[in-house]
Image (cartoon, grey):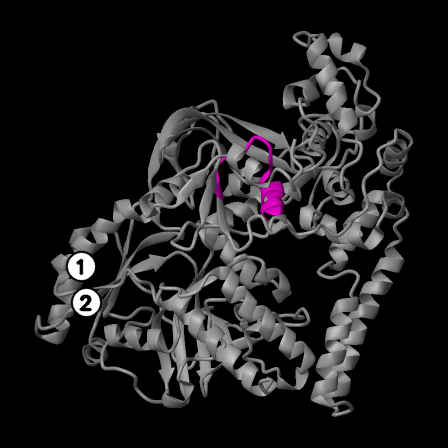
Amino acid sequence: MAQVPENRIQWLLSEIRRHDRLYYVLNRPEISDREYDRLFAELKSLEARHPHLVTPQSPTQRVAGEPLAGFATVRHAVAMLSIDNTYNAEELRAFDERVARGLGSRDYDYVVELKIDGVAVSLRYEDGILVRAATRGDGLTGDDVTANVRTIKSVPLELQDSRNIPDVVEVRGEIYMPKTTFAKLNEQKASAGEPLFANPRNATAGSLKLLDAKITATRNLAFFAYASGELSEPLADNHYQILQELKKLGLPVNPNIKKAKDIDEAIGICLGWSDKKTKLDYQIDGMVIKLNSFGQREILGATGRAPRWCISYKFAAEQAQTTVKSIDVQVGKTGILTPVANLAPVLLAGTTVKRASLHNFDEVRRLDVRQGDTVVIEKAGEIIPQVIEVKSKDNRPPDTGPVKPPTKCPACSGTVKKDQNGVYIRCRNPNCTAQLREKLKYFAGRGQMDIEHLGPALIDQLVETHLVENFADLYKLKKEDLLEFEGIADKSATNIIEAIEKSKHPPLWRLIAALGIFNIGGQTAQTFAKYFGTFEKVLAVNKEELKKIKKEEELKKKLLRKKYDKQGISKKEYYKQREDLRKSERLKDIGTEIIDSLCDYMAKPENKATMEELIELKVRPESPKSVPVSEKLAGKTVVVTGTLENFTRTQIEQAIKENGAKTSSSVSKKTDFVLAGKNPGSKLKKAKELGIEVIDESKFIKLVQNGLKFK
């Protein structure tokens, strides 16, 4: 006898919540990712057939339906105070002396935690249901970011055993972005020609302040609970017990929390993490030491801005001192002028640093950095070298002057202009040779048209000799043209021409992405390719038509919601119609700014002429089509690390997906094998420690060679 849908849905909800707790809270999963995905898919299918049974707490409802107009302000029931900082053991002992004096005793203990470098938030649960998430703000009021926080998989939408907990449970914690996710996000931004995030914390803050939760959902944010706020009934007498209670409720708590019987033990724990912190997949900038007893905390109280019962121990960032030899200005493919400091080579965090981005000219002015200055540099997020301080400005070379923002492009002498309401200065000359170089390098790159042998040095020569002045000119090159260049022999010239010819039939989305249009990277290009179908239709794009379609799609959703709110249709009918609308959307996740970018690009006469030339030269991209999924790697979880020879990161992830497997950003016991390229880094070491199989690129190709295209 078939199971009643209501019962099956309730069982699936219970199972998925149980497995979420096992995975995110207890770190001991019982099933594979594929088995979990099957449970999730079954729940989604059942809810689609029985929409009246869908609840807001279902894991299928994490992403909000419509973008927000803005963020409301939330007043915290219990203030979210700051924490005072210390930087050495002596200052920690001085803090301990103040605690002892305040309590009139040394009968107390501490809890020591990692200080996650993310964004502090407060989660409010009423009757066990997540009703609000707010940023810290000024400590008294913050922004309501509930829609975005609901997308974070490690944040439970409903607490475990909700019938046995207080009516109100407010949880304090940190939202953060894993290092692996941060690196991948910056790769995507670079591909789209957008400025990079400086560090994971900035990326987290930016992701939480997006008005469209669907985009936030792609950022793979995570959460650790570290304290309680307002509680309608007490859960425990001390901090360590509260953390255990929060874990029981299904909230993720960092596993590295330790109790310390005194300040010496606490200091030892702090110092022990100075070297270990780099092994974590998230950024920490120090430790937090908290008095354990809530009763003793009440005795100590707080100042106007910080509690007297806790202290932060900040790690000294790995820094180096060096000299600024010169400051250059780089011109990117979208015309952004970026100041870059050329440094006397210095070893920092295991690598030799010779250059550091100064980001923009507002930052140059803030630092007042000049040629000849002695500067302190560090790696933001232990990834990107940056200048953080100028040392001894009084002793700088007498003949050095302040760096002035350019009034002309350093490459073409064209007009430059600062972005409206922005910080970036751009070259406005469409014929700028520096922009052309960067555009051609991007166009030919492995993630776009994938033209082998067309490297940066050759592109520089092609631009300098005016043989190539736009994308179409690449397809007019002849073997004889290349033989004129020093170092290019007959065989090399033949290989280059063959590679250019081979690139004439890419998937449509690759050609759209290769144009380097501002705001349009690979993922957006795929949406447009699916919508237009052919390159000719992309060329004929009509801004008014696209915006009309977008407006109509948004209006239909608003009218449907309005109809439901006025009780014009049943809940069951509302969910059915909403799902139908979602399926029919043609411009899903495409905003008006992206529409403007595409249409404005195609409207420029010089761009339109180049596109028409590409068609005349028989550059014929393939229309989108469904890719059949192979079962060769069915159910496998694969981690990719290092640089591959035959695939870009996008290509290898697509290849893995097309063969029935899924990729993961970190190595764990659930990883089936690691695909390692050149310079694999710490993931390879962890795989070996866990005894996980490691294969190289050639073995991967052999695994799937009958169903996978590769170079």
Type of the residue with mark 1: Ala
Residue at the (52%, 37%) spot, across then down = 358
Q: Nearer the viewer, residue 32 or 141?
A: 32
Tell me: residue 581, above or below residue 318: below
Q: Which residue is mark 1?
A: 266
Please count the marks in the image. Answer: 2
Inspect the image, locate mark 2, and give the three-letter code of the amino acid beneath it.
Tyr
Q: Which residue corresponds to the image point at 64% horizontal and 19% vertical from the top-left? A: 457
Q: Please provide percent x and percent y for residue 344.
A: 41, 23
- Which span of residues is magenta-colored? 640-656
Tell me the residue at 34%/34% (across/down): 320
Q: Is residue 269 left or right of residue 172?
A: left
Q: Which mark is residue 110?
A: 2
Q: Is residue 644 above or below residue 282?
A: above
Say what secondary structure mark 2 lies in. Answer: strand
> Disc 1 or 2, which lies upstream in sequence?
2
Residue 523 visible to an observer of this rendering: yes
Rendering coords of residue 474 (x, y %): 79, 24
Q: Is residue 317 left or right of residue 574?
A: left
Q: Estimate the x, y position of residue 483 in percent, counting from the top left.
A: 74, 8
642 magenta-colored: yes
Q: Quadrant of the N terminus?
A: bottom right
Taking the view exactly as shown, the residue that stands out farthest to the bottom is 567
Instruction: For the residues labelled 1 and 2, say whether their Cβ atoms are less than 8 Å apart.
Output: yes
Picture quadrant where residue 563 is located: bottom right
